[in-house]
Amino acid sequence: MSKASQKSTLVDIIYDNIRKDITQGVLLPGQNINIQELSERYGASLTPIKLALNRLISEKIIENFPRQGMKVKSVQADEIDEIFDMRLMLDLYYTKEIITTINYNEVIREELSRNVAEHLEIVTDMTPDSSVDAYIQNYNYDYKFHELFLKCSGNKKIVDMFHYINPFLYSNYIFRRQSKEKNIAGVKEHEAILNAILSEDEEALKEALTVHSYNAKRTIGLILKVNEIL
């Protein structure tokens, strides 16, 4: 293995460890990031720690304040409405183009179908005791579905906007707080979105997207509101 690939692999591992620590509440929302402490915790030098943190900053999971340092990003319950409303706006804007792209591109159709099938298998197998890895894998499939959906619009700027608002930031703060039934229902909603696309039914697609956004907004918002009270 080359030195470059070794460094890349180490950064990926540290990134995953920091993400898991945030998800499990080892690193709390609003907490200051001490790079030296992370170096000691993960047994790595400062350089890969900084590279992993830069990746988390680009994903809006870590906030960087000039001359003040870094903090774990906080998400308030009242932000969820704005985040999901913006995501729905992105989803609804290019429905015609997305339907055309997916129905004329077999590779993308297969990738979306595989995403839904594999995601459904993951959430069906999850239990209240499932590891943080299974939890993060669940949300990675969710993220990839919506990212690929928007890429089919052919508009790079709208995909960049999706990355910028990072609508899945909340996933770092609701570990084991969403029921298995809700997880399964969410993937079934992805299936309804895909079926509407394959049927080339734009109205059904818009309805499926709206229902999915509303249900996610309501569920996640309630979880975060309860967290704030507790």
Image: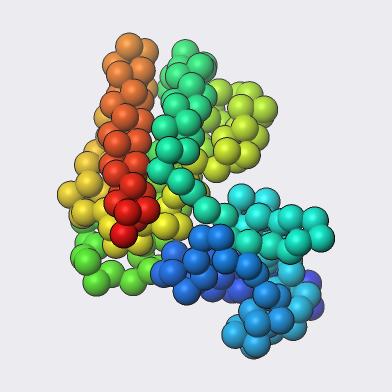
Count up the numbered dots: 0
Which residue is drawn at the image coordinates 59% and 73% (left, top)? 13
Q: Is residue 12 above or below residue 122?
A: below
Judged left or right of residue 168, residue 128 is left
Q: Position of residue 124 (x, y in %)?
A: 21, 56
Q: Residue furthest front?
A: 229
Q: Residue furthest right?
A: 67
Q: Position of residue 100 (x, y in %)?
A: 48, 17
- Quadrant hosting residue 131: bottom left
Judged left or right of residue 5, residue 42 is left
Residue 148 visible to the viewer: yes
Which residue is drawn at the image coordinates 36% and 13% (left, top)? 202
Q: Position of residue 225 (x, y in %)?
A: 33, 47
Residue 106 visible to the viewer: no
Q: Position of residue 191 (x, y in %)?
A: 29, 35
Which residue is drawn at the image coordinates 61% and 27% (left, top)? 158
Q: Is residue 50 above or below residue 73?
A: below
- The image quadrant where one finds the N terminus is bottom right
Q: Is residue 56 above or below residue 202?
A: below
Which color scheme did the rendering employ for the protein?
rainbow
Which residue is drawn at the image coordinates 45% and 57% (left, top)? 172
From the viewer's side, name the closer residue of 168 and 68: 68
- The image quadrant where one finds the C terminus is bottom left
From the viewer's side, name the closer residue of 169 and 82: 82
- Quadrant hosting residue 180: bottom left
From the viewer's side, name the closer residue of 91 and 70: 70
From the viewer's side, name the closer residue of 172 and 146: 172
